[in-house]
Amino acid sequence: PPTAAPRPTLAVRIALPAPATSVAWHAAGDYFVTACRTAPGASGVAVHRLSTGGSQAPFRRLKGPPAVASFHPTRPALLVGCGAGVRVYDLAKQALERRLRGGSGAAVALAVHPRGDHVLVGGEGGAASWFDLDLASEPFRVLRYHSAAVRAASFHPRYPLFATAGDDGAVHVLHGTAYADLASPPLIVPLKVLPAHGVTRSEGALALAWHPGQPWLWSAGGDGCACLWVEA
């Protein structure tokens, strides 16, 4: 007879100074970074390593509580959303590399293109800002499709697709082609609006995750539902 699947067990518990607002894995899989809105003067960003069981705070203090953080996929860099901008830190030099300015309100969602040269930032003002790191520190394009804060953004790891999720309950799916030729700007085309989630206590669509090999999208919301979206 088939054996029952093993029950999941708690492997690691990490105490943070405040509730986590962001968790992101490094591409190599051994590290992950957390961000939490701590008191002024304290660092709310921590990097954790599974193989050693250790954690460290790479910054003593940040200007403003961080809402989101993510590793760069191809080089030792960390992106941190603080206030209305995103700071890019060189982890090898332990120094601030650049600031991404503009957008729509405080940065609360962050996604880095798999190639590493484009960044999507969601703001509390209801817009998602596409940054081309090879061109400027201001947005290449501001996508004003949501009527409430953009809580999640995600690039597909293989297909030219990306999505944003907002507190209006909607998930927007867009085509986004990033060309290697710097003379060719990114091609961004809206594809579909998914009425994904009901709004509960002002929270709509809160999280997104792409299937690694298929153009399928998971979304989760404040209504307590997780949805899998596939091509019709």
Image: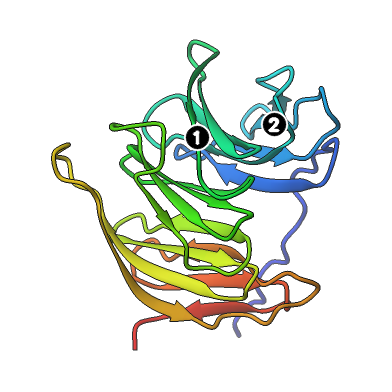
Q: Nearer the viewer, residue 64 or 217?
A: 64
Q: Secondary structure at mark 1?
A: loop
Q: Label 2 amino acid?
A: Val
Q: Position of residue 113 (x, y in %)?
A: 37, 46
**Between marks 2 and 1 in the image, the one whose residue lies nearer the viewer:** 1
Say which residue appears at 68% left-offset and 82% top-offset: 198
- From the image, which quarter does the C terminus lie in? bottom left
Outermost residue on the top side: it is 93
Note whether 110 is above or below 172 in the view shown.
Answer: above
Q: CA distance from mark 2 to mark 1?
A: 20 Å
Query: Residue 218's spot in the image, x, y percent?
Result: 52, 71
Q: Name the kind of residue labelled 1 in the image.
A: Arg
Which residue in the rendered view is the most extreme toward the bottom? 232
Residue that label 1 marks: 101
Q: Quadrant of residue 150?
A: bottom right
Which residue carries the number 2 mark? 45
Secondary structure, mark 2, is strand
Q: Is residue 145 left or right of residue 60?
A: left
- 79 vs 74, left or right, is right
In primary-sequence order, the first of circles 2 and 1 is 2
Residue at image coords 66%, 32%: 48
Identity of the residue drawn at 72% across and 62% down: 8
Q: Position of residue 37 (x, y in %)?
A: 78, 40
* Image position of 138 with respect to 108: above or below: above
The image shows residue 32, relative to residue 10, as above or below, that is above
Residue 134 horizontal side relative to residue 87, left or right: left
The dot on residue 62 is none
Mark 1 crowdedness (10 Å alpha carbons): few <14, some 14-19, many ≥20:
some
